[in-house]
């Protein structure tokens, strides 16, 4: 019997085994998140070599892209949580039925988001206060990603379903593959053809010389290949829920859609409002100049090295808590919530120390411009102090998603960022510049972590889950 199957077996699980199980699921999930971050680092470093204007073009629309990606990702969560509950209850036929329904539902939804993204691609950089030197490139970058959203959504859906089934290794391995493909595609598409001399031999490397557009096309190509691979494995190979040799309708039922909406709608609204706040931060930063825009964008990417392991542990928490809840083992679900949150805080605390010590080096990898490096490094050292409490909010949120409790946690997230971060950033930015914006972020994340710890310890989230 595999460790994850112990949850639905009803057998006692010792505290040591609980910790081991949490670690076993968290490790590959963290590696998947880290490989995704490495891909962002590589993109940022490659674009950074093109100059400050190209870096600013990407940074200007990056938060808007996170809005689109996040909305499509969140809509898949409403279905994957139901699958986790069904697996926990050993109802594999229902799990397969929900999987079928999710495929059509998520495709239609992501198609509508793609149409909306395409419609605003041209005016968006102008709305965000971008200069004429960056707006055209920013529009192209946003358009490529926006139109590819239906394909990218299948990556989110397939990976989420595999994780909720307890399979963290396949999504992790495929994310590493995606990172490698991204390097290759970007290298060929961003830069012009060039010749290197190696041991006396001339090596010619072809290149399309597309710049910012090449960065978008290369990343989308890598993600598309990965989406195809992850969906193939899910539908053909994943034990218990694969659709090979089975039959059933892909038409969504009202009951499944209602439960998916109960989970996804608050998360989607919360993510949209939070990204709206991040866009507002971009508007606050824009008057500080091109250097500040580029430094802010690179610093956000650099900081993700710290918090993405937290999201990996949160993925594991959603699986462990979701299956425990589906199996009717609420005490076990609560213990997994405490274990994974503590793991996340410890991991991100260590990453925060690393970020503080090596902030200038990390920024130097992304841009050769000294002013950008100095601005970004200063911001990162401020943010490093918030990492433990940021971890608490990330993982505790994943715990609550596992039972289907998303309404109040979503309100806590967007209330914190809009009522604490944005007002503080508006107050501090004129006098402290980019440091003021990041100090506001640091204070807000500490506040957010505190309220999530309070709710986790209260146990109220266990009473707000979906009816299994």
Image: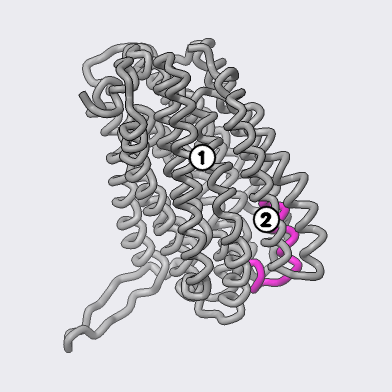
Indicate yes or no whether the magenta region holds residue 206.
Answer: no
- Residue 285 covered by magenta stretch: yes
Categorize mark 2 by other alpha carbons within 10 Å: few (<14), some (14-19), many (20+): many
Q: Depth check: give the residue in front, 147 or 66.
A: 66
Position of the N terminus, as image quadrant, is top left
- Going by the image, does 441 lie left or right of 14? right
| x and y, in percent, of residue 232 in the image | 28, 33
Q: What colour scheme has been applied to the protein in the rendered image? A: one colour
Residue 260 visible to an observer of this rendering = yes
Assign the magenta stretch its main secondary structure.
Answer: helix
Residue occupying the point 22% across, 16% down: 245
Q: Which residue is mark 1?
A: 395
What residue is rendered at 27% in x and 29% in y?
3
- According to the image, label 2 marks what residue? 441
Is residue 391 found left or right of 134 in the rendered image? left
Image location (x, y in percent) of residue 442: 66, 56
**As drawn, 357 above or below 171:** below
The x, y position of residue 195, in whole percent, is 28, 81
Q: Is residue 236 visible?
A: no
Circle 2 sits in a helix, a strand or a loop, which is it? helix
Looking at the image, the residue that sits furthest to the bottom is 200
When the figure is inspected, residue 426 is found, relative to residue 267, above or below; the finding is below
184 lies above or below 35: below
Q: Are marks 1 and 2 in contact (CB under 8 Å)?
A: no
| Number of dots carrying numbers | 2
Alpha carbon distance from label 1 to label 2: 18 Å
Question: Which residue shows up at 40% across the image and 36% down it?
Answer: 316
Under tag 1, what secondary structure? helix
Part of the protein shown in magenta? 278-293
Q: Residue at x 56, y 53 (%)?
A: 142
């Amino acid at each position: 019997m595999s460790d994850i199957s112990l949850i639905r077996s009803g057998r006692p699980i010792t505290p040591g085994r609980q910790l081991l199980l949490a670690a076993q699921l968290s490790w590959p999930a963290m590696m998947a998140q880290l490989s995704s971050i490495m891909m962002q680092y590589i993109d940022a470093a490659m674009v950074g070599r093109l100059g400050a204007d190209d870096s600013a073009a990407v940074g200007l629309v990056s938060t808007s892209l996170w809005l689109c990606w996040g909305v499509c990702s969140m809509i898949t969560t409403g279905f994957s949580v139901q699958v986790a509950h069904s697996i926990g209850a050993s109802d594999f036929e229902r799990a397969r039925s929900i999987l079928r329904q999710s495929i059509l539902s998520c495709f239609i939804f992501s198609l509508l988001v793609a149409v909306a993204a395409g419609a605003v691609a041209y005016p968006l950089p102008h709305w965000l206060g971008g200069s004429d030197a960056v707006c055209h490139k920013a529009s192209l970058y946003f358009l490529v990603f926006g139109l590819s959203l239906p394909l990218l959504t299948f990556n989110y859906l397939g990976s989420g379903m595999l994780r909720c089934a307890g399979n963290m290794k396949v999504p992790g391995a495929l994310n590493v593959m995606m990172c490698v493909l991204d390097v290759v595609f970007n290298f060929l598409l961003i830069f012009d053809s060039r010749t290197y001399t190696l041991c006396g031999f001339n090596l010619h490397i072809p290149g399309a010389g597309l710049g910012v557009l090449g960065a978008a096309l290369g990343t989308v190509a890598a993600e598309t290949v990965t989406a195809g691979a992850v969906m193939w494995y899910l539908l053909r190979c994943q034990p218990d829920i694969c659709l090979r040799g089975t039959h059933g309708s892909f038409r969504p039922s009202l009951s499944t859609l209602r439960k998916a909406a109960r989970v996804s709608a608050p998360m989607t609204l919360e993510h949209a409002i939070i990204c709206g706040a991040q866009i507002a931060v971009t508007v606050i930063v824009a008057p500080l100049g091109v250097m500040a825009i580029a430094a802010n964008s690179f610093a956000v990417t650099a900081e993700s090295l710290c918090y993405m392991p937290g999201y990996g542990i949160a993925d594991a928490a959603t699986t462990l808590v979701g299956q425990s809840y589906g199996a009717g083992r609420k005490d076990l679900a609560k213990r997994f919530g405490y274990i994974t949150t503590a793991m996340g805080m410890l991991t991100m605390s260590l990453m925060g120390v690393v970020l503080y010590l090596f902030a200038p080096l990390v920024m130097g990898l992304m841009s050769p411009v000294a002013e950008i490096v100095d601005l970004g490094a200063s911001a990162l050292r401020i943010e490093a102090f918030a990492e433990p409490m940021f971890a608490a909010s990330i993982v505790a949120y994943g715990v609550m998603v596992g039972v289907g409790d998303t309404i109040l946690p979503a309100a806590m997230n967007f209330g914190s960022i809009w009522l604490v971060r944005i007002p503080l950033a508006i107050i501090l930015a004129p006098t402290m510049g980019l440091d003021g914006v990041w100090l506001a972020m640091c204070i807000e994340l500490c506040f957010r972590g505190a309220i999530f710890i309070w709710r986790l310890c209260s146990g109220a989230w266990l009473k707000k889950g979906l009816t299994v």
